[in-house]
Image (spheres, helix red, strand yellow):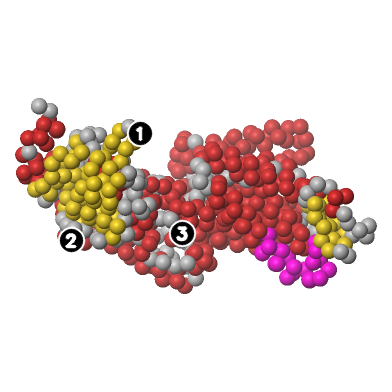
Amino acid sequence: MKAGRFSKKELTTYAIVVAAYIICEILMLTGIMSSHMKGLLVPICYYAIVAVGLNLCVGILGELSLGHAGFMCVGAYSSALFSYVTESAIPTAPRFIIALVIGVVMAALAGFLIGIPVLRLKGDYLAIVTLAFGEIIKNIFNAIYLGTDSTGLHFSLKDMASMGMEPGGKIIINGAQGITGTPSDSNFTIAIVILLVSLFVVQNLVSSRDGRAIMAIRDNRIAAESNGINITKYKMLAFTISAAIAGASGVLFAHNISSLTATSQYFGYNASIMFLVYVVLGGIGNIRGSMIAAVILYMLPELLRGLSDYRMLIYSVVLIVMMLVNWSPKAREFREKHLSFLKIKKEAK
Amino acid sequence: MALLEAKNLSISFGGLRAVDGFSIEVEKGELYGLIGPNGAGKTTVFNLLTGVYQADEGRIILDGKDITRLDPVHKNQNGIARTFQNIRLYSHLSVIDNVKVGLHNHFHYSTLAGLLRLPSYYKVEKEIEERARELLSVFNMENEADVMSSNLPYGKQRKLEIARALATDPKLLLLDEPAAGMNPNETAELMETIQFIREKFGMTILLIEHDMKLVSGICERLTVLNFGRMLAMGETKEVLKNPEVVKAYLGE
């Protein structure tokens, strides 16, 4: 039987996050942390969140998705739209909570709808189609014009003029320029809370009845069918939750910057591949590992800015070293032998 | 009435008629053998019975219910469990988690209860844990509960697959070459295990096997397949004496 309500492994993960939070808060209070570094804290959190969410899809469900930047985009836009419109009407705290719910639900809905056709595919095909859907989402948001005036809402996918707005109207989404003036409601504390909730959801899912069914499908689909596991249901469940978590990350993204644009840098397939790099290097199926990898790999290029030209060179060397250390059998053997004291003792059942 | 009744099952792959007019009646509590040379269509019959393939013709009736057109998931939920010729365990899950997957449809709590760890999660998980350990102890594997299933020795992997199939609480258990790749000692032990689960759970078992010693030792009745057709069926001893069967196995 499990000791207490949570396993040691789960508690360690939460403890790492809380400890990191406390250390960062202390560094900020004592003024040691540079303002540049302070600005990185929320992005670190939302990339860690999306890595945790993607690991649910890639590591636990075993399906390679390259569309998670798209789900993040859905979460970002839907929540930013809400916050922008209701900025003067609702106070900050409830507004952000509602925005978060909207972002998560919209991303989950997008995940669900895209999951219906996509989860029929396997392996590389699934990766290609999710990549395409991610790009489609980004491009749709790039093309949306939305405005409001005395006659009501105006919408166009073409250009501003075709909305036919009155001169005094207010533009909400301005095509490729996105939403400008979203209130910056997120901060480091909120980001950490959302990260903890994401970890809570994913870790609880993994050790539940549904999680076992999902992993059974990953390990052997035919056997899972013969054990009476509803394949479609559990694939959809995992994919939808994974998309929802990416949406939560998008909400943080949108409320951390004042102008939200669906650029390739943040929401294109390159971003999706970057998330995948976090997951793979952190360990496929290793929730805590993907979180840590996201933190390290996001911070690294930022911290190496001083080295200008050599920045990406060092970054790629670190990628290779992490890959070797995490995955090569020799390195694993070495870790088992010499670093086993770092490992948490297997919990007594 | 027979527990399993299959009538005139046929399936073709392209031009090849892999199974042609296969019929079987397995009584409740019976241990029935299905034998035949390589490529005779034995596993195809299993795949038809479990819904992996849909039969072109024929009907399958389990316990009075027509289950011909059901998919594997619903065939299992109606009471057919199976093992596989090439072992299919959940290799990244522990031994006990493999069994827990088998118990999936018999213990329920909502997804939300699982995500939020509501009290029902702890209550039902405890029941699942107890039941899974109980099943493992039947197979003398309770000490390996937390071992990764891919790290088990071969014979135990076979046993675990049977335990997992039993966890789904079937009416009929299909074993596809359970003794394949086992040495004589392991085979003897497996024979005992099969006898034991049959008595303990009152299980009806349909078994594909190559090992004649195992077949003649435990099966009451046999059906012999050759080239997708039924060559003979009846009491084990008589079937094995049948000159047609000897010819199919040993040549002329």
Q: Is residue A105 left or right of residue B40?
A: right
Q: Amino acid at mark 3?
A: Asp
Q: Are marks 2 and 1 in contact (CB under 8 Å)?
A: no
| Residue type (three-letter) at the residue carrying disc 2 | Met
The residue at 45%/71% (across/down) is: B120
Marks 2 & 3, CB-CB < 8 Å contact: no
Instruction: Estimate how packed mark 2 is, as few (under 14), some (14 to 19) or many (20 or more) residues with alpha carbons within 10 Å.
Output: few
Q: Main secondary structure of the magenta part?
A: helix
In-image side of A327 versus B77 (left or right): right
- Quadrant where the N terminus of chain B sits is bottom left
Question: Marks 1 and 3, how far apart in space?
Answer: 39 Å
Is A116 located above or below residue A301 in the figure? Answer: below
Extent of the magenta region: A84-104
Callout 1 environment at 10 Å: few (<14), some (14 to 19), or many (20+)?
A: few
Which secondary structure lies at badge 3? helix
Mark 1 or 3, closer to the camera: 1
Q: CA distance from mark 2 to mark 1?
A: 35 Å
The percent position of residue A84, horizontal first and vertical second, equals 80, 61
Write down the residue under mark 3. A210
How far across and down, in percent of the image, does residue A103 sit? 68, 59
Within 10 Å of the Cα at label 3, are there few (<14), some (14-19), or many (20+) other Cα atoms? many
Q: Say what secondary structure mark 1 lies in.
A: loop
Q: Is residue A95 magenta?
A: yes
Is residue B20 a member of the stretch shown in magenta?
A: no
Q: Residue at x 58, y 55 (%)?
A: A112
Label 2: element kind: loop
Residue wearing tag 1: B14
Check disc 1 and give the amino acid type.
Gly
Q: Position of residue B179 (x, y in %)?
A: 21, 43
In percent of width and height, residue A320 lies at: 59, 34
